[in-house]
Amino acid sequence: MSKLNQIKLPVQLEDLAELLTQGKPNWKLIRERDKLIKHSEDVMWLEFGEDGFFKEKHDKPSIGRSLLMSPFNQFFTWQTTVVTEIVEQREDYIKFKTENSNYELFKI
């Protein structure tokens, strides 16, 4: 029986997102303005060229990159707009601003 068949209502959307990720979530993203929470097993940082098309993927955040949360296919969990400022950064945490939002990303 799949995990989805075992869900009993009511279920929180945040809990459902965790069940739908492949494997155990290792990352938690919180958007500041509305406390939106997203979970994913892995993250990557995307760089785009001057033409706006994908240029390169990275393991580390940097200004000008966009956060992509797994799975890494057309059903990705979340993608931010381009990072404009890194407010605070540690090995397991980053607080950053994008073109239209502020976020905190935690390694869990």
Image: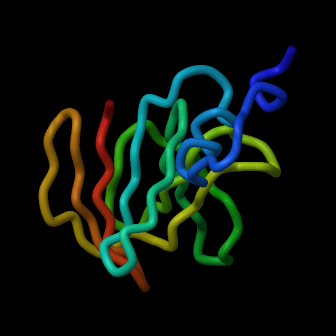
Q: Horizontally, is 77 left or right of 3 in the view?
A: left
Q: Is residue 19 above or below residue 77?
A: above
Q: Nearer the viewer, residue 26 or 73?
A: 26
The spot of residue 80 in percent (x, y) is 51, 66
Q: In the rendered view, would you say 66 is above or below 4? A: below
Display coloring: rainbow
Give the residue at x 82% y 51%.
74
Residue at left offset 56%, top offset 47%: 69
Residue in the picture at 59% in, 76% down:
50
> Residue 7: where, in percent of width, then height?
72, 33
**Extreme residue toward the bottom, this view:** 100
Residue 1 relative to residue 102: left or right: right
Question: Looking at the rendering, which quadrant does residue 73 occupy?
Answer: top right
In-front residue for pair 51/44:
44
Residue reaching furthest to the top: 1
Picture quarter containing residue 107?
top left
Residue 42 in the image: state x and y as whole percent: 52, 33
Q: Quadrant of the N terminus?
A: top right
Total residue callouts: 0
- Residue 88 placement, left or right of 99: left
Look at the picture and state if 50 lies above or below 88. below
Question: As rendered, which of 31 and 6 lies closer to the eye?
Answer: 6
| Residue positioned 66% across, 75% down in the render | 52
Give the quarter of the image for residue 78. bottom right
For the C terminus, give its image quadrant.
Answer: top left
Q: Which percent across, then down, holds residue 29?
A: 40, 53
